[in-house]
Image (cartoon, grey):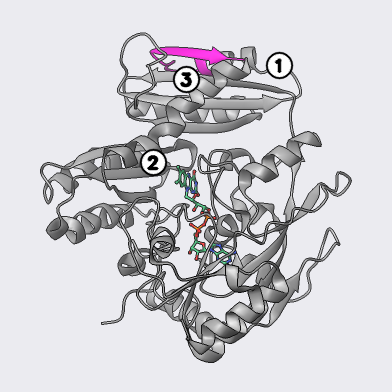
Amino acid sequence: VSDPLLARLRDVVGAAQVLTDPDVLATYGTDWTRRFHGAPRFVVRPGGTAELAAVLAECHAAGVPVVPQGGNTSLVGGATPAAGEAVLSLARLDDLGEIDVVAGDVLAGAGVTLARLQETARAHGLRFGVDLASRDSATLGGMAATNAGGIHVLRHGMMRAQVAGIEAVLADGSVLSRLSLAGKDNTGYDLASLLVGSEGTLAVISRLRLRLVPDPPHRAVALAGFATLADLLATVAHVRDALPSLEAAALVREHTGVGAPLQGDWPLYVLFEAAGREPQELLLAEAVLDAPVPPGDAVVAADGPTQARLWAYRERHTESVNAAGVPHKFDVAVPLGALAEFVAKVEPGIRAHAPAARVITFGHVAEGNLHVNVLGVPDEAEHAVAESVLGLVAGLGGSISAEHGIGLAKRDWLHLTRPPADIAAMRALKAALDGRGILNPNVLFPAPG
Ligand SMILES: Cc1cc2nc3c(=O)[nH]c(=O)nc-3n(C[C@H](O)[C@H](O)[C@H](O)COP(=O)(O)OP(=O)(O)OC[C@H]3O[C@@H](n4cnc5c(N)ncnc54)[C@H](O)[C@@H]3O)c2cc1C
C-alpha cells in the first residue's frame, strides 16, 4: 500500500508491525462477544513508549483516528474500530519490571497480561488485588483504561485503587509521566486517576506502577445455595461483617455445563472466598452457617483443585453465554436495598420487547453488581430492551456501567446516570486533551445526531 502515513509508520515501528492483511484486520475489528464489528484501516503495533509517541504524532498530524486495543476482551465494544479508524495495539508494550518487595509494587508495560503479572507476583509472595476470568488475555493497560473490577473488589477495590502511577501518551504524541517513586505524591491534578476509566479517549497508557498486596497462605472457597434473594442477601451481609478476610461474594444464577456441586437444585448460589494468615475453612464455614437464615445447602473447599472447580462454576458463565449465542450484556449496579426489586422486574421488562429472549444473570453481589446477559434479542428490539434494563437501573438509583465501561454498547444511555453538567465537563476534558478527536472517538459519548 503506498499510503504515505503507512510508509511513515513503517519507518517508526518496522514494516512487520503495520498490519494491512484483511483477514488479520478482521480479528482486531471484531469484539469478544462478536456483537461489534469494524474494518480497521490498519493495525499498528509500537514496541515501546518512544515508538508509541511517534505513532500518535503521525496519526495526529494525518488526522487518522486510532482505537487503543490491549487484549480485546472488552464486553462493551470499547476496543472495536469504526470504518476508517486504525487499531493501535498495545500488546508489544510488555516489559514487566522487577517486583519491588519492599515498596510492594511493580512497573509494568500496558500490554502485560493480568495472568503474567499474577504469576510473577506470586513467585515473590505477593499478589495483584484485581482478578478477572479474562486474565490470560486482558492487559494491565486495558484494565486501567476500563477501571476493571472483578472478583476481589470487596477486599481490594477496583483497578484505580491499585494504580500508583501512570505513563501515558497524549493524542499529539507528548508523554505524560506520573511514575513517581515516592509513596505519597500530591503534586497537582491527579492525571493518573483521571486516565483510569477513560476508555482510551484521553490518552494511551504506556506503563503503570501498580501496587501489590501480600499473598495470604490460607484460602477457602464455599458455594452456598439459597431459596430466595432475601435469604441470600442476609447471609452475604452477615458473612461480610463476620469475616474480615472475605475476598469475594459472587452471585451464580444458572449452572453452565459444570456439574452442580450441591445436592438438589437451588435457584440462587453464592460463591464465597476468604483468604488470610490462618486456615480459613472453619472460619468461612462458621460465618456462612451462622447466618440468621443459613443457606439451604453449602460446601466448603480448602484444597486448591476443589476450589478451582467451584470457581469454574462461576467463571465459565461468560464463556458459556458466548457459546450459546451473541449476547446483549448489561453490566449494572443497583443499591443492595433495591436488588430484589431489580431482579423481580428486569426479566418481565425484557420479555415485553423480546418474548423469546433468554436471560442469564450473575455478578458480584456484595457490590450490587449484576451482569444481565440477554440472548436472542431481535435487531428491531435492541433499543427497547436496552432502554428497559438501563431505565430500570437508573430509576432505582443505580449505575448503567458497574465495571465494564460504556464503550459503544451504552453510549446512548450515558444521560441516564450522568447529568448534563457532568457530560459537559467530560466533553471539555476530551476537547482539552484531544482537540482533534483522534482517540477512540466513537465510545463513551452518544453518537452525534
Ligand atoms: C471472560 C471474561 C470475563 C470478564 N470479567 C470481567 C470482570 O470480572 N470485571 C471486569 O471489570 N471486566 C471483565 N471483563 C471485561 C474485560 O476483560 C475488561 O474490561 C478488561 O479490563 C479489558 O482489558 P483488555 O486489555 O482486553 O482491553 P481492550 O478490550 O483491548 O480495551 C478495553 C478499553 O480500554 C481501551 N484501552 C486498552 N488498552 C489501552 C491503553 N493501553 N491505553 C488506553 N486505553 C486502552 C480500549 O480502547 C477500550 O476502550 C471480562 C471479559 C471476559 C471476556
Query: Which residue corresponds to the image point at 41% horizontal and 12% vertical from the top-left?
Result: 297
Q: Amino acid at mark 2?
A: Gly
Q: Which residue is mark 1?
A: 279
Mark carried by residue 223 = 3
Q: Which x, y percent locates residue 48?
A: 70, 68
Q: Amino acid at mark 1?
A: Pro
- Type of the residue with mark 3: Leu
**Residue occupying the point 43% across, 61% down:** 24
- 14 and 360: which is toward the camera: 14
Give the CA distance from mark 1 to mark 3.
Answer: 18 Å
Label located before the other in sequence (1 or 3):
3
User: Please, what secondary structure does the residue beneath circle 1 have?
Assistant: loop
Return the x and y of residue 193 as percentages of the image width and height. Answer: 64, 65
Q: CA distance from mark 2 to mark 1?
A: 33 Å
Q: Earlier in the sequence, mark 3 or mark 2?
A: 3
Residue 340 in view (yes/no)? no
- Describe the element under mark 2 as helix, strand or loop: helix
* Residue at the disc numbered 2: 337
Residue in the picture at 71% in, 16% down: 279
On the image, the x and y values in percent for residue 111 come to: 63, 57
